[in-house]
Amino acid sequence: MTECAGLDIGSRSIEVVVVRGGEVLSRRRAPTTFDPLSQVRALFPDGPPPRLAVTGYGRQLALTLFPEARTITEIKAHAIGAASLFPEAATLLDIGGQDTKAVALLPGGRVGRFEMNDRCAAGTGKFLEYTATAFGLSVADFAALALGGSDPPEISSMCTVFAETEATTLMARGVGQADIALGLHKAIVARTVAMLRRVGLRAPLAFVGGVAKNPCAVRLVAEAVGFSPLVPDEPDMTGALGAALWLAKTPS
């Protein structure tokens, strides 16, 4: 059987999954940086497999390197990847670095109704990264800080710049950093759960994308929807996996 590779070029990271006959052979990732094509070349030191599918915001850019590659939309790739990991999933939430997707899943990983926020950083991993930096913390430490909060203030602005200003004002009023961090996480989750409800939230819910590695975000999603989401071991690999699996079933 021919190897098929899925390449997901996201705003913060690039992932590659190689499959053969539906079995995953390898996974690898690299930061996107300001030179994603160099990162892609490094991920394929011996060139890509005979068949390559590309997804993510940089999928058209990748065609300048690999003109024979096939492209697949992010929503379709994530739906196929999530369905392969969790066939029972009825709804999909993908929070990446620069956009958020809420998808009603149909049998076989087909896409029903969906919504996508890609116009600003509000409700995305970039929002958390920006606000974590304002606290002088890594995203992982920012999530750990938020888990220690108990009385989160309501964050009224989802604009990254205004949210930072609001957080600074709250600290000046004596609100604890852990509570502010929790409030910022809750603001993101409230926005994304509203998207899920608009597409028709049903359990089970698959939660993928880089933010699904954030334990505070996972806990808050569970609290907001009333049940625990299904989270893959490597949630940021779902798009690349879906692209590879899609290509494996697509005639050459």
Image: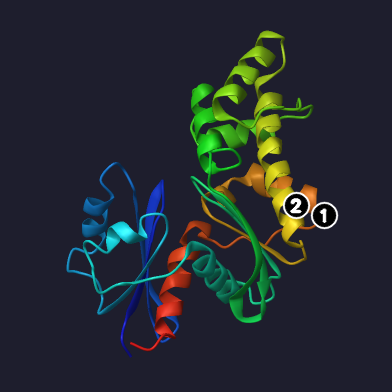
Please tell me whether residue 231 is drawn above or below residue 192 in the rendered image. Answer: below
Q: Is residue 103 something that shows in the picture?
A: no
The residue closer to the viewer here, 152 or 109, is 109
Q: Residue at x 61, y 35 (%)?
A: 144
Q: Position of residue 173 (x, y in %)?
A: 71, 9
Please state if 230 lies on the left or on the right of 246 as rendered.
right
Please tell me whether residue 143 is drawn above or below residue 11 in the rendered image. Answer: above
Please state if 43 lies on the left or on the right of 234 as rendered.
left
Please tell me whether residue 53 is drawn above or below residue 156 in the rendered image. Answer: below
Residue matched to label 2: 222
Asked which quadrant contains residue 191, the reply is top right
The residue closer to the viewer here, 91 or 251, is 251
Which residue of the protein is positioned furthest toward the right in this rendering? Answer: 226
- Residue flagged by tag 1: what amino acid is it? Gly
| Label 1 – label 2 distance at C-alpha | 6 Å
Q: Position of residue 23 (x, y in %)?
A: 43, 81
Q: Residue at x 69, y 15 (%)?
A: 170
Q: Residue at x 23, y 69 (%)?
A: 67
Asked which quadrant contains residue 80, the reply is bottom right
Label 2 secondary element: helix
Q: Position of residue 55 (x, y in %)?
A: 41, 63
Picture disc at residue 100: none
Q: Position of residue 142 (x, y in %)?
A: 57, 32
Q: Residue at x 68, y 48 (%)?
A: 192
Please tell me whether residue 229 is drawn above or below residue 23 in the rendered image. Answer: above
Residue matched to label 1: 226
Q: Quadrant of the C terminus?
A: bottom left
How would you rate the neighbour count of disc 2 (Cα within 10 Å): few for under 14, some for 14-19, many for 20 or more? Answer: some
Coloring scheme of the render? rainbow
Confirm or deny contact between disc 1 and disc 2 (CB under 8 A): yes
Asked which quadrant contains residue 157, the reply is top right
Please state if 150 lies on the left or on the right of 132 as rendered.
right
